[in-house]
Image (cartoon, rainbow, N blue to C red):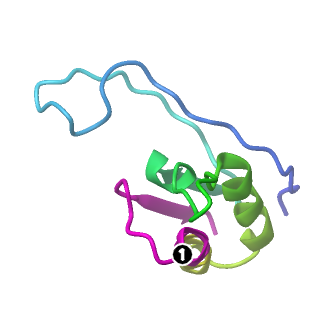
């Protein structure tokens, strides 16, 4: 069984975001994931969501949700994050798009 590390690594690359320019050139990199590990990819629309008081959702709140729900299946983690962002935002409309991908290695 893989040891739980409670560690986050932000994957960053150079250049334009994927899909912005069809002629864009991208470098390739790789990571291996052990059983039980998560890969969570989200757009800034998640952590930049604001509540009615103007406070941002933030990356720490995002990470806390991942920690809290890490033992659940990928779809449940995704649904918990989306629900938390929606609740945090309240009745306001979204200001930015939100894209979220959660992969859990079994």
Closer to the camera, 98 or 73? 98
Instruction: Kindly identify the residue that appears in the image at 62 percent across and 56 percent down.
Output: 57
* Residue 92 x/y as whole percent: 44, 70
Q: Is mark 1 on a helix, strand or loop?
A: loop
Does residue 12 belong to the magenta stretch? no
The C terminus sits in image quarter = bottom right
Q: In this view, does 23 lie to the left or right of 81?
A: left
> Quadrant location of residue 50?
bottom right
Count how many numbered circles sit on residues in the image: 1
* Residue 54 x/y as whole percent: 58, 54
* Residue 61 x/y as whole percent: 72, 57
Q: In this view, does 92 lie to the left or right of 20?
A: right
Mark 1 nearby-residue class (10 Å; few <14, some 14–19, many ≥20)? few
* Residue 94 x/y as whole percent: 39, 63
Instruction: Kindly identify the residue that appears in the image at 45 percent across and 60 percent down.
Output: 100
The N terminus sits in image quarter = bottom right
Q: Measured along the vertical axis of the image, is residue 18 above or below residue 74? A: above
Instruction: Kindly identify the residue that appears in the image at 79 percent across and 70 percent down.
Output: 68
Question: Is residue 36 something one can see in this rendering?
Answer: no
Q: Write down the residue under mark 1.
A: 90
Question: Is residue 65 something one can see in this rendering?
Answer: yes
Q: Measured along the vertical axis of the image, is residue 34 above or below residue 18? A: below
The boundaries of the magenta stretch are 83-106
Instruction: Kindly identify the residue that appears in the image at 45 percent across and 24 percent down.
Output: 13
Residue, far left: 23
Closer to the camera, 48 or 19? 48
Closer to the camera, 91 or 63? 91
């Amino acid at each position: 069984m893989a040891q739980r590390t409670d560690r986050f690594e932000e994957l960053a690359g150079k250049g334009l975001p994927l899909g912005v320019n069809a002629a864009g050139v991208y470098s390739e990199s790789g990571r291996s994931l052990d059983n039980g590990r998560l890969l969570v990819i989200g757009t800034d629309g998640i952590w930049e969501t604001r509540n009615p008081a103007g406070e941002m959702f933030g990356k720490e709140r995002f990470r806390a949700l991942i920690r809290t729900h890490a033992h659940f299946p990928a779809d449940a983690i995704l649904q918990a994050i989306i629900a938390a962002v929606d609740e945090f935002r309240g009745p306001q409309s979204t200001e930015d798009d939100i894209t979220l991908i959660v992969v859990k290695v079994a």
